[in-house]
Amino acid sequence: MKGLVIKSTGSWYRIRLDEGDKVEARIRGKLRTTGIRSTNPVAVGDIVELSQRSEGDWSIDDIVERKNYIIRKATNLSKQTHIIAANIDLSVALVTLKNPKIKFGFLDRMLVTTQAYGIPTLIIFNKIDLLTNEELDYLDQLKSAYGNMGYEMLQVSVQNGTGIDHLKSLIQGKTCAISGHSGVGKSSLLNALTGLEIARVTDVSDFNEKGQHTTTFAELYEVNETTFLIDTPGLKSFGLIDMEKEELKDFFPEMLLRSGDCKFHNCLHINEPGCAVKPAYENSDLPWFRYENYLHFFEELKALKGH
Ligand SMILES: Nc1nc2c(ncn2[C@@H]2O[C@H](COP(=O)(O)OP(=O)(O)O)[C@@H](O)[C@H]2O)c(=O)[nH]1
Ligand SMILES: [Mg+2]
Ligand SMILES: [Zn+2]
């Protein structure tokens, strides 16, 4: 029998069977290795093959090949990875212009990562009820900037319901991974979309009492029979681990689009002569903060890989 992994604690898993029943299962034998050095063999979003050993006693026997998965380093130093979630159709980046103020570093990191995984991304601006006309104008500029890069965007207010029906139509039939900084309204949005009261319960901190980084697990919620939301905590240390610094430029769609006009085919758009990309940022055709984030991530990858 097949089932969808909706929760993982590391030792047991909650599984949604095809008819919607939930069971708990354990891994007993050795699972076919996936070739990833991860701390968790099975992740939320995985489709698994199950067998029932006795009443209420289920075993995970196999993992159906993943369409994709997102990972992060298990700890800051280790080479091991932690699979955050698998089989994602849409990545949703939840941000707010204010309360809290948008962090472009976080947004662009997410966008680069999902671009690298080939997962479509929807950027949702929440709390638009709080915005003045001036701020709404600024939002329009931002939307057109990211829109020109090819990203899909939506503005909503979870509080007064603006845009929520539209959002429901965009996610229908999909498994969506939702991430956002604390305070942007992720729990409120999960509640609004699932009709459940899951707020706060899932607000697990990324750090334990000693301030050590702990592994927090994603959790999957059901909107309807075919639509699922995965709450992905701890995405600050998300991504950028699986790529070479020379590849990074390809995950900035606006760079990729213009790179054919650079003098050198392997131009990194940093200080090469005849670069067609850097000038587009310098003369404000493209937002400068995107370029700053590119340089920032580039340095980060350089440090990470040690060359
Ligand atoms: N004004 C306004 N407040 C919101 C909206 N959505 C959520 N909030 C509030 O923002 C705060 C943080 O929300 P929460 O869902 O806990 O955010 P999380 O940390 O991302 O899970 C709460 O006080 C919510 O009531 C919105 O659309 N407009
Ligand atoms: Mg929350
Ligand atoms: Zn260039």
Image (tube, helix red, strand yellow):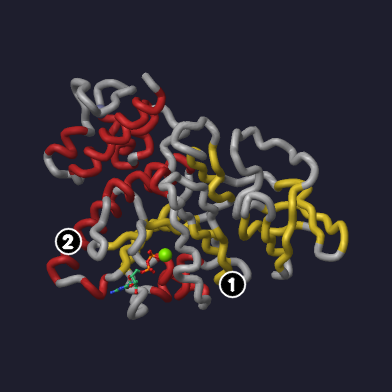
Q: Which residue is mark 2?
A: 138
Residue 75 relative to residue 150: left or right: right
Identity of the residue furthest to the bottom in this view: 160
Residue 169 appears in the picture as rendered: no
Q: Residue at x 63, y 45 (%)?
A: 66
Residue 50 lies, with reference to residue 117, above or below; the image says: below
In terms of depth relative to the viewer, which is nearer, 216 or 287?
216
Residue 24 lies, with reference to residue 248, above or below; the image says: below
Residue 186 appears in the picture as rendered: yes
Residue 241 lies, with reference to residue 302, above or below; the image says: below
Looking at the image, tell me whether mark 2 or mark 1 is earlier in sequence order: 2
The quarter in which the N terminus is drawn is bottom right
Q: In what element is the residue under mark 1? A: strand
Say whether mark 2 is within 8 Å of ligand 1: no
In terms of depth relative to the viewer, which is nearer, 5 or 141?
5
The quarter in which the C terminus is drawn is top left
x and y percentages locating residue 152 in the rendered image? 36, 57
x and y percentages locating residue 251 in the rendered image? 37, 38
- Quadrant in which ligand 1 is drawn: bottom left
Q: Residue at x 41, y 71 (%)?
A: 188
Residue 255 lies, with reference to residue 217, above or below; the image says: above
Q: Amino acid at mark 2?
A: Tyr
The residues tagged by marks 2 and 1 sit, at their Cα atoms, a distance apart of 35 Å
Residue 111 relative to residue 274: left or right: right
Q: Amino acid at mark 1?
A: Asn
x and y percentages locating residue 113 in the rendered image? 42, 43
How many residues crowd around disc 1 within 10 Å: few (fewer than 14), some, or many (20 or more)?
few
x and y percentages locating residue 20 in the rendered image? 70, 70
Q: In what element is the residue under mark 2? A: helix
Q: Which residue is mark 1?
A: 224
